[in-house]
Structure formats: structure tokens, C-alpha cells
Image: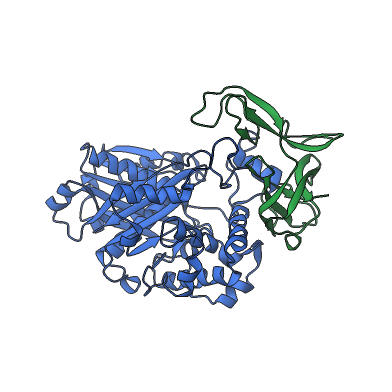
Chain colours: A blue, B green
Amino acid sequence: MNGVVVLGTGMHPWGKWGRPFLEYGVAAARAALRDAGIAWTDVQYVVGADTIRNGYPGFVAGASYAQALGWTGSRIASCYAACASGAQALDIARTRILAGLCDVALVVGADSTPKGFFKPVGGDRPDDPDWLRFRLLGASNPAYFGLYARRRMAVYGTTPADFAAVKVKNARAGSLNPMARYRKPVTAEEVLASPMVADPLRLMDICATSDGGAAVVLASESYARRVGARDLVRLAAVSTVTPTFPNTVLELPNFATDSCAAVPAPERPFRAAIADAAYEEAGVGPEDLSLAEVYDLSTALELDWMEDIGLCPSGEAEKLLREGETALGGRMPVNPSGGLASFGEAIPAQAIAQLCELTLQLRGRAGPRQVPNARAALAANQGLFGHGSAILTTT
Amino acid sequence: MTYAIEGWFAVDADGVFLLGTKCAACGTVCFPPRNGFCPNPRCEGEEMEVTRLPRRGRVWSYTNACYPPPAPFVAAQPYVPVTLAAIELDGAGIVVLGQVAGLTVDQLEVGMELELTSGPLADGPLVWMWRRAS
């Protein structure tokens, strides 16, 4: 079978550098090309994951990167899917390779973010739920994270100490990652003493907004063999599913759930469906994973995701956490990169950065974060308004 | 009194009501109200009737905004944390988010009964809010 493989990965360190997003994207792209051992002029297809907070060049990111790297006449695409933009960009490139329309593609995402809470983009728009939720309710992103966290506490008895333990675990992993923005280990006491932001979540429970960039070179397996690549990591699945009606979880930026009065709720809620589609496509199950990267917008959400991707039954994520199973050195490390807790959100780069970590781990090149004998890994993520995102890689 | 948004809630002698829509074909209820066609993918319905949603429900979850939310929210001066609750409306199979009037997070619990009211945003117009059930 001529599948799609990751030929190279590259990142620009996450931080709050205050420079144009293109700089981060180009740096990441050049690093990925070096890692892949190919020249920019060899790339046949470029996909840019868009950023919506950086003016017009951000909306046409594919062309912006292609121009910055030097026009070569390659074909391009630009796409936006909120936090799932990276997965969407990967899926476009992967599909084109699988269709036989190209052999090698470059996928790039980068962001430069303003300070503080994300605000709605682009003027007064009273017909846009993303504008209205701020106007009518003052419901920032952390407000939704707070709702999920409180719900979890009520249903499963999770405690603030559990949330703090997630941060401690991820900060420790992040301290070993040269690309992470936050590289200082933290204690549970520090987390629990940080200011409350959206009860029950404190400042250190919630991910920051960051600058950063990530890129990967994808290729057909035959191309990879032709250029003599070793340690091939297969991109076995990319899941971009939407919710199934009625979606009974209150999602950002909505005011309400769908109603399940006339049509019963689907057997599998949205987040679980995202991972399930990736497992089905790859023919791999959660029991086959060596590690997972999940979208820890908050510490509490990491626990939800662990259950959604099938690492344990509902309500048992705390048990795995408390037993150290999800830490580096545990049976199933979760967010060995340090996760968003150590990186912060750089929206279009995030899913691509997740693939970078999966690839490093499966190639055995993750240094002090290395998960021994990593063979299969899943990254899960979710974009605003119902964009699912999961990536499954195998050796 | 000005409403912060037209057509999403009504205030009259009977109290405050959220205005949803109900599909004439399959009965699916929506909030906010919608025009055109039914969100149920297996329904061809195009007739959405405005309907008053149940005024009471139980807390699905709650939180607050300890720091002033960004514009276009207008924060009161001095700022008092906004309390938010997501309420499972009785019998409607739907959870609706709203500000909470007169209760802090310390006074809320998941499962607690709240009812609809309305209250002003800091710059004047009214929005729907939840309050302790009478």
C-alpha cells in the first residue's frame, strides 16, 4: 500500500515574541524541509492553515508562505477551521497525495496572538454568535472551559487538586521540550494559589494564547523511499468529523445545545466521535496507542478527552492521573509534549504541532521526553463551531 | 425598555420567556430562534413556529468571569464578577446559557432549580437572566 508518511517536521519555539506570524511559519517550514532532507523547490503542493488575527496575509496563508519562501509555481491551498485548521490542512495535503495528484507537500501553520482573552474578530456583528456571546453574556472561552470543569466535578467528584495535578504533569513534560513556551516545573500549591479566572478554573488551569509555528512535510511512501528516508511515520488517519444532531453538549460559541426532545441524542457524543473516526480509518484502537496528545485548553478538559479517546471509561480519568499512568514514564503518557499547558494556543499551528510531537516520539527522537518503543499515537483536537480534528500515526 | 437582542426573549405580565422555534414537522425546538429550515438532518420541515420555552430548569453547570470580559461586553464599574449558568430546561431537552442574577458561584449547585428573569447589561439594555426559582 502506498500510504502517506511524515517526511519531516519543524517548529518555531512558542512564546509571546510579538513578531509577524510569517516569520514563525517560514522558520518552521525551513526546519521541516531540512528535517525531510529535501529542497523547497522540490515541494509540489503547499497548504497554509490560516490565522484570522493577522490581516489579509493570514487569510491566504498558503500563498503568504509560498511567497515568503520564494515563488516556485507550486500549487497551494489555504484553509481555516479554528483550532482544527492544522488538521484540515493536513487532510487536504494527505488526500491530494493519496489521490496521486502530488508526491510531496508542505503544511504550515503559525500565529501571532494579542495579549489577554481572545476577542471576537472584526467589528460589530450582531448576527454572529461569536460576537453576541461576548456582548450579551460576557462568555469568553474560559467561561465554557469553566462550565465543563464544574460539570465534571459534579458528575465524577473531580477535585481542584486533580486539575492541578494535570498542570504539574504537563509542566514537567514541557520543561523537557525546547519548543515549549513555559519550561518551568510547577507545584500543585502554585496552581491552587493562582488567581481564579472562571470558577473552578484558575489562571494556571487555563492555556495561554501564544505565538508559534509548526510545519510538516508529507509524502507518498514511494517518494519517501526514493529519497532514502528512514524511520518512516505513517499518517494513518485524519478525522475531521462534525457533530451528529442533536449535539447535547454546549459548544463554544453557542448559547444553547441542540434539543434532544424530538430526536434522541446520538450514542456517541461529538468529542468521542472525533477519535472514533480516526481509529476506524487507521484500523487501530485505543489499546494500541503508545501515547496521546489531547487538546488541554484547560486542565479539566484533558481528563474529559482521555475518556473521549477511549483511554478509560467515563469518570475514571482521575484514577489514571493519580496513579501516574498518564505522566512520562507511565503506561500511557498524555501530552508528553507538555500540551497546551506548556505551549499555549497558536491556533493554526496547534494540530500540526501535535503531529510534530507524534512523529518525534514514533521516530524515537523525543530526547528526555521519549516514550519507550512508541508505535502508535493519537492527537485529538476540536475547532470552534463543530470542527473535529484527530490524527493517528503509526510506525 | 430596550432589549439587547430582539426576538430572543419577551417580557409581559406572565413573566419573562425565552423565544425559541419549534419545527411544525418534527417538533425539534431551537434556541436562539431560527428561520428557514429544521436543523434535524432527517426532517424536511421549513415551518419554524415561534414558541415560548419552559421558564424553569436545572443547573447543568455554572461558572463566572472573575475578570472583566472583553468588548463588546460592557463591564460595570466597579466590576462585579458575572455569574453564568447553563440550564437544562424542563421537558425541552435543551440547555441554555445565561447570566445569573443575584447569585454567586458559591450559592449555585449542579441540579439546582432556577427560573428565567431579565436584567440590564451595564450600559442599559435588557437580557434574559437566570435567578433562584420562586
| The N terminus of chain B lies in quadrant | top right
Residue found at x 44% / y 52%: A381
> Residue B99, percent across and down?
73, 49
Q: Is residue B130 visible?
A: yes
> Residue A93, percent across and down?
30, 42
Query: Is A265 positioned to the left or the right of A175 in the image?
Result: right
Residue A37: quarter of image? bottom left
The answer to whether residue A15 is above or below residue A218 is: below
The answer to whether residue A303 is above or below residue B87 is: below
Residue found at x 61% / y 73%: A192
Residue found at x 58% / y 60%: A152
The answer to whether residue A27 is above or below residue A95 is: below
The answer to whether residue A327 is above or below residue B89 is: below
Q: Tell which of B121 and A238 is nearer to you.
A: A238
> Residue A350, percent across and down?
42, 54
Query: Is A263 positioned to the left or the right of A229 in the image?
Result: right
> Residue A369, percent across and down?
35, 71
Residue found at x 59% / y 75%: A190
Q: Tell which of B89 and B36 is nearer to you.
A: B89
Q: Is residue A109 visible?
A: no
Query: Is A35 positioned to the left or the right of B90 in the image?
Result: left
